[in-house]
Amino acid sequence: MKIVTYNVNGLRPRVSQFGSLRKLLDSLDADVICFQETKLARQEMRADLVQAEGYESFFSCTRTSDKGRTGYSGVATFCRVKSAFSSNEVALPVSAEEGFTGVLKISSGFGKSEYPSTIEGLEDFPTDELRKIDGEGRCIITDHEHFVLFNVYGPRAECDDTERIQFKLKFFNVLQKRWESLLGQGRRIIVVGDLNIAPSAIDRCDAGPDFEKNEFRTWFRSLLVRNGGPFSDVFREKHPERREAYTCWPTNSGAEEFNFGTRIDHILSAGPCLHKEENKGHSFVTCHVKECDILRQFKRWKPGNTPRHKEIKARNVKLEGSDHVPVYTSLMEIPNVQQHNTPSLSTRYCPQVYGCQRTLVSMFARRQPEEISLSGESSSIPDDSVVVQVCSQLIKRPQHACNPSSSDLIHEARQSQWSQLSVKSFFQKTVGDSGDSNSVSDKELTQADISIPCCESNETLTDGGEQDAAKEWQSKQSTSMQEDDTSQPSEKDKNNVALVEWQRIQQLMQTSIPLCKGHKEPCVSRVVKKSGPNLGHRFYVCARAEGPASNPEANCGFFKWATAKSKNKR
């Protein structure tokens, strides 16, 4: 049995990158796949993003409306199964729960909940506080009978953000109490996910002397067996001395080029092995974990990529993929379980997804041009030929009816259901009814207006003269368009002007951009986005990718504020 954890940094872009959700899941080739940072809100859960043939899925989305937290975080667990009903596969959970505090719904594949409504150790926490912890969509629990799997996305907190630090402390405090409650019941636990904690100096590229004194790293290490805790860091159990084993890299510094990252994506396990005989040498890791490693082939930076400092274009190219890579573990000697059905938390029962499936055809239909009706017949938005047809129909009407000096033209047309509407008024009505301001463009409305003057004739035209009038109108239109084309500059001229202007701007920039001291190369400009006194200020840094100080090819650390005039701009 194979379990994978992967911070996808947005499920939509990963699905787009691989072509479909099914291809993304198959590329990981695992029985249970745990995603973090899906960035999906409940109303955005479409079938093509949450359901794939051969997989059962369980989602937790952010529920908070706090500023900057909507459509943020989110976790999802996908289980590869042959059948979702009457199955004895371990990969299919017997029950599932959103969150870990017990305040959100718990569902079971046996038709009833196995968990108490109040979690042991959490009785003293206010319900609103627990709901806030679970409100950011950071955990999905799936019970696979032999073990309980926690898919966790730990909060991130900057060192100067007191509010988020307190939230992170409370989050892990409550989570630990839930673990202790399950271990007290004799359950085995597997925890996977991006915990946003690098536990030791070996797990960080630029760890300083006080790195391990951080309160969250201290807490993490206190959980481990070697420090008297119940959990094993599965990766470190298999690779205790491996260095530069990172799972995440900064997104804006090109740090992947020199593998300048951190290990914050983990797989932890706690509890006894499945063997009945008691032996001190037995544990879940030693008896059931075959392997645990990092899937480096999912890194955005590939060996053939152009280094950032070699070409200006390479600095601005956004690498495709997540800023994390997956971590996996392979389990062995895990027997089947009793027959059960997929829990009701599965997305196959999600009303949002079910609603999207029912209206899939209409969703695609809305993307097509609006249809109009001419004399009871349906057609797409008219081109010139249709406008001529409308005009010819208007020509049949009495002269006083199509006199443009009459202010009641549109009013009279709307009074009678058999009257021919002007094209302009018809489009205006369509836009108002559909509510879609993009259904008709300004250009199309202008063309429609042109159909009115062809009716300004002092003679009553017969049926035989309609075609001549239409041809004459088309000829005038063609001549008018040609005159407009000659008066406008050609596309080539526009491109040449833009090219010259861009070259002038580049030349100006080259003369004002400083050179870094380490490599004597042009720097790149950045703007401070963090709140504070320097917000909006521009500065220059070395253009090379971030890397270890011992590597002369890496970023030299050059920094310089822009001119005082630019610095004062906001």
Image (tube, grey):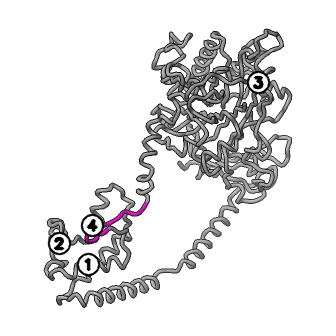
| Vertical placement of residue 370 versus 34, above or below | below
**323 horizontally vs 393: left or right:** right
Q: Are marks 3 and 4 in contact (CB under 8 Å)?
A: no
Q: For the image shown, how many numbered marks are present on the structure?
A: 4
State the residue at coordinates (65%, 47%).
Answer: 23
> Disc 1 and disc 4: Cα gap in Å?
13 Å
Q: Which amino acid does the dot numbered 1 rest on? A: Ile
The amino acid marked with disc number 4 is Phe
Q: CA distance from mark 1 to mark 3?
A: 81 Å
Q: Does the CB distance between marks 1 and 3 fall below 8 Å?
A: no
State the SS at label 2: helix
* Lower position in the chain sequence, tag 1 or tag 4: 4
Residue 267 image-quadrant placement: top right
Label number found at residue 501: none
Q: Quadrant of residue 233?
A: top right
- 82 shown above or below 553: above
The span from disc 2 to disc 1 (Cα, nearest Å) is 11 Å
Magenta stretch prevailing secondary structure: loop
Q: Is residue 390 visible?
A: yes
* Left or right relative to 485: residue 3: right
Name which of mark 2 and mark 1 comes first in the sequence: 2
Q: Residue beneath label 2, please? A: 409
CA separation in Å, label 2 and label 3: 83 Å
